[in-house]
Image (cartoon, helix red, strand yellow):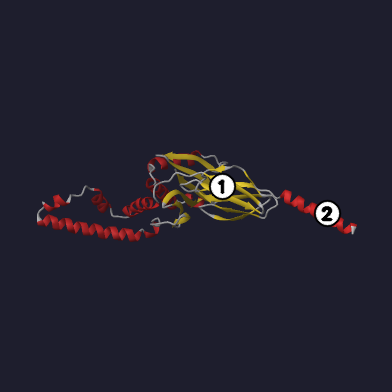
Amino acid sequence: MKRFMTVVMGLGVMLTLTACGNKLTTTKTTYKQDGLVAVIKGDATGADKVQYSSVATDGSVKVNGGTYAITIPVTDKKQTVHLTAGKQKQTVTVNAAKTLGTYKNVATKYNQAVIGSALPKSVQKQMQAKQPTKAQIAQMAPAAQMAMATKAKQMQAELAKATKATKDKQLDATAKAGIHEVLNTKNAVVRANVADGKAVGFALIVPVKAMKDKTKAKDFATTLALLGNATGANAKDVMKKFQKAVKDQNDSKTTIDTIKSNGVKFNVGVSTSHLYIYITK
């Protein structure tokens, strides 16, 4: 009996020690935007996984070496994130992020630029030229009115042709809430973080090896410039700063200092295989 009690007491001590060793902590109480997400980190010693839930997402992550990292898509509103590891619970806050406007408006502006660049130069000039008003057209001679109508039909035909030809280069017209891929070409991938129809941020991802090819590098530059312009930045200013930053970059660095233009921020990160550009506000 004494031996049995000793074993039971030993198990009790082990359980107590295990319970004491099971903890759940976070590195901060409030987190802010980092690219398209907020990264919550902490210690969950004694747990196999940490479950999380917020208005933006929910799920679980594995605990490795006692630590964990959770990515929560940022939104235009402050979020409360609930964490659970076994019987341990924690709550942290993710700050609201500024938006770049509605996703629909950004996508429309981007796509119009893509389509416009595919039009013949002569049609581009016609579209950029000041068009007569209905009252002015009404005062024209019948022959002139017919010529205007014919020209308008030709422009519409060219526009439809360019729209179809650039379909694979256009951003998705609409996007679901959360982080989703909205463009995937041979040379670049664009992801958008959308909340309540608003664009919280974009990520442009390009293979590093593509930057060594002139054609692919040009496609990347075009995509970056169009995204910058569509989100309210000065595309020429952004490209000038980006090219200078790349030129001045130290080989030991994996990031480039934040580029700012008209309140829009461009954060650049480099891995061994890809270049990441996060566009936020």
Q: Residues within 10 Å of mark 2 (few under 14, many from 20)?
A: few
Q: Position of residue 221 (x, y in %)?
A: 42, 48
Q: Amino acid at mark 2?
A: Met
Q: Amino acid at mark 1?
A: Val
Q: Residue at x 63, y 46 (%)?
A: 42
Circle 1 is placed at which residue position? 39
**Front of the two marks 1 and 2:** 2
Question: Tag 1, which secondary structure?
Answer: strand
For this rendering, which residue is in front, 128 or 12? 12
Identity of the residue drawn at 17% across and 55% down: 148
Q: 90 or 122, which is in the foreground?
A: 90
The location of residue 108, given as percent across then percent down, is: 35, 53
Tags 1 and 2 touching, CB below 8 Å: no
Q: Is residue 200 above or below residue 153?
A: above
Q: Quadrant of the N terminus?
A: bottom right
Q: Which mark is residue 9?
A: 2
In this view, 270 is above or below 157: above
